[in-house]
Image (cartoon, grey):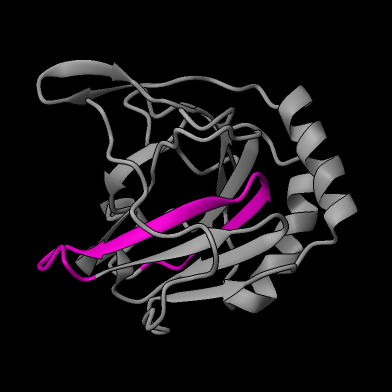
Amino acid sequence: MIEQLAFFPEAGQTTGIPDDILKYIPGLFDPGLGQRLMAKFIAETPWTQKTVRMYDKDVITPRLSAWYADQDTYDYTSIRKSAPNSWTPELLMIKNIVEPIAGISFNSVLLNYYRDGQDSVAWHSDNEKALGPKPTIASVTFGQVREFDIRNKADHSEKYSIRLEHGSLLLMKGDLQTKWDHRVAKSTKPMKPRINLTFRVVI
């Protein structure tokens, strides 16, 4: 399945993004620190590439991922309910920075590695029961700027985009997962690597 290309301009964010579902904080992490963390994650993370079932076909996800969590937390994204990787000092450091901003203690993080512009994530919402009815998810980006698109499930003409910059934090909250879909689309333009960390609470 070919994803549509991003439909928002490169410069700036679209206006009118509802602040009850998204909060964007650019430059939370020092650029140099972000580069060092990114290089370490790329080199040392036990990346895997999952296969998902879509439209009666097995599809390989166009990105690499890794799951880290408290040891009593299962990977709800895996059919095997696999044991998580153990927290690293770097992940705990980032976790300790974002938790006071989010006002939540997270027990897990999903790392995604977008290697180039062809790596992406299709329209979806993180509305699994294991995350609760209105989850708060903290999304940290290192590396290539990519557009994060959202659209209203009931009215696809209502849509917004945020350019996720190196060292930024995006808080997803409120009704985002129940009433909106989101994606990171493919791009025909040359794209450098990007690491994204989404901190979550698995109930």
In the depicted structure, whether residue 92 falls above or below residue 179: above
* Whole-percent x, y for residue 193 in the image: 65, 33
- Between 109 and 111, which is closer to the camera in this rendering? 111
Q: Residue at x 68, y 67 (%)?
A: 98
Residue 101 horizontal side relative to residue 178, left or right: right
- Between 73 and 24, which is closer to the camera in this rendering? 24
* Whole-percent x, y for residue 63 in the image: 48, 28
Is residue 138 visible in the rendered structure shown here?
no
Image quarter (top left, top right, bottom left or bottom right) of the N terminus: top left
Q: Residue at x 60, y 22 (%)?
A: 47
* Whole-percent x, y for residue 49 in the image: 47, 20
Is residue 202 visible in the rendered structure shown here?
yes
Image quarter (top left, top right, bottom left or bottom right) of the C terminus: bottom left
In the depicted structure, whether residue 94 falls above or below residue 53: below
In the depicted structure, whether residue 25 falls above or below residue 116: below
Residue 80 horizontal side relative to residue 188, left or right: left
The answer to which quarter of the image holds residue 69 is: top right
* Whole-percent x, y for residue 39 in the image: 81, 33
The answer to which quarter of the image holds residue 166 is: bottom right
Q: Residue at x 31, y 69 (%)?
A: 176
Q: Which residues are magenta?
A: 135-158
Residue 97 horizontal side relative to residue 187, left or right: right
In the depicted structure, whether residue 92 falls above or below residue 62: below
